[in-house]
């Protein structure tokens, strides 16, 4: 687990969602300078942080909506730290939880050097990574569904579904492939009793 340990004059923790985000900005002494709920709009965000742009760091929990904020911070030359969601949950998991508390906790973890950070993928590589993640999900789902069908066939004592599928989708069966249903082996005659 790696932590972001750099010190800054202003620390901003954001609890980010698809349509809204909750900002919490602390000064170097830990005093709350801004604590506000706002829409996820680039112009509104830049206007809100404008008075605190001097040596500002922004911390966000790693969920699916962080791309636009990382790109905006890179364009505006603001330090952006992506918090590792799983490790953050282990550190600050509490009973009381809402957007206001989460934003404050992210800001405090970042200010104290206790925010476990994740790798911020470069913009050019994100599409490939997302495509591979989607493909992996679909491949796993396909395997689960095929196993489910196979188990259903077996529970009904039907012939092997996969062998049937391979024959119907892969052209004529090869002469070396095993037959679809194998006949039982011939029974040997019972031994004759000694005379």
Image (tube, grey):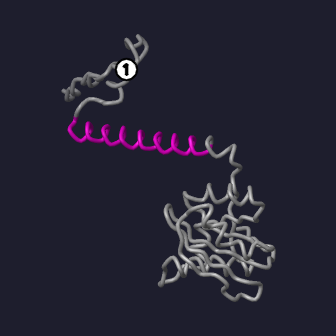
Mark 1, residue position = 169
Q: Is residue 150 magenta?
A: yes
Q: Is residue 191 magenta?
A: no
Q: Main secondary structure of the magenta part?
A: helix
Would you place residue 174 above or below residue 75 in this image?
above
Quadrant in the rendering for residue 166: top left
Q: Is residue 55 left or right of residue 186?
A: right
Task: Determine the residue positioned at 52% across, 43% down.
Answer: 136
What is the x, y in percent for residue 188? 25, 24
Q: Quadrant of the N terminus?
A: bottom right
Task: Determine the residue positioned at 71% across, 49% down.
Answer: 122
Magenta stretch, residue numbers: 129-157
Task: Determine the residue positioned at 48% across, 79% down.
Answer: 98
What is the x, y in percent for residue 106? 63, 76
Task: Using a 10 Å C-alpha cutoff, classify the residue at mark 1 as few (fewer than 14 neighbours), some (14 to 19) or many (20 or more).
Answer: few
Between 121 and 140, the one nearer to me in the picture: 121
Would you place residue 181 above or below residue 103 in this image?
above
What is the x, y in percent for residue 147? 36, 41
Q: Is residue 132 left or right of residue 179?
A: right
Helix, strand or loop status at disc 1: helix
Quadrant in the rendering for residue 191: top left
Task: Determine the residue positioned at 56% across, 41% down.
Answer: 131
Quadrant in the rendering for residue 128: top right
């Amino acid at each position: 687990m790696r932590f972001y340990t750099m010190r800054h004059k202003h620390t901003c923790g954001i609890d980010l969602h698809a349509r809204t985000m909750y900002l919490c900005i602390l000064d170097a002494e830990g005093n709350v300078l801004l604590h506000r709920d706002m829409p996820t709009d680039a112009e509104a965000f830049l206007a809100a942080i404008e008075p605190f742009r001097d040596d500002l760091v922004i911390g966000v929990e790693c969920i699916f909506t962080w791309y636009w904020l990382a790109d905006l911070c890179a364009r505006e030359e603001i330090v952006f730290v992506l918090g590792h969601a799983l490790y953050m949950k282990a550190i600050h998991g509490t009973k009381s939880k809402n957007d206001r508390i989460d934003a404050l906790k992210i800001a405090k973890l970042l200010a104290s050097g206790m925010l476990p950070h994740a790798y911020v993928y470069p913009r050019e590589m994100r599409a490939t990574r997302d495509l591979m993640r989607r493909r992996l999900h679909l491949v796993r789902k396909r395997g689960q569904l095929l196993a489910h069908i196979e188990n259903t066939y077996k529970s009904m004592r039907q012939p092997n579904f996969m062998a049937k599928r391979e024959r119907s989708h892969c052209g004529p069966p090869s002469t070396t492939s095993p037959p679809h249903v194998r006949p039982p082996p011939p029974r040997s005659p019972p031994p004759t009793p000694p005379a």
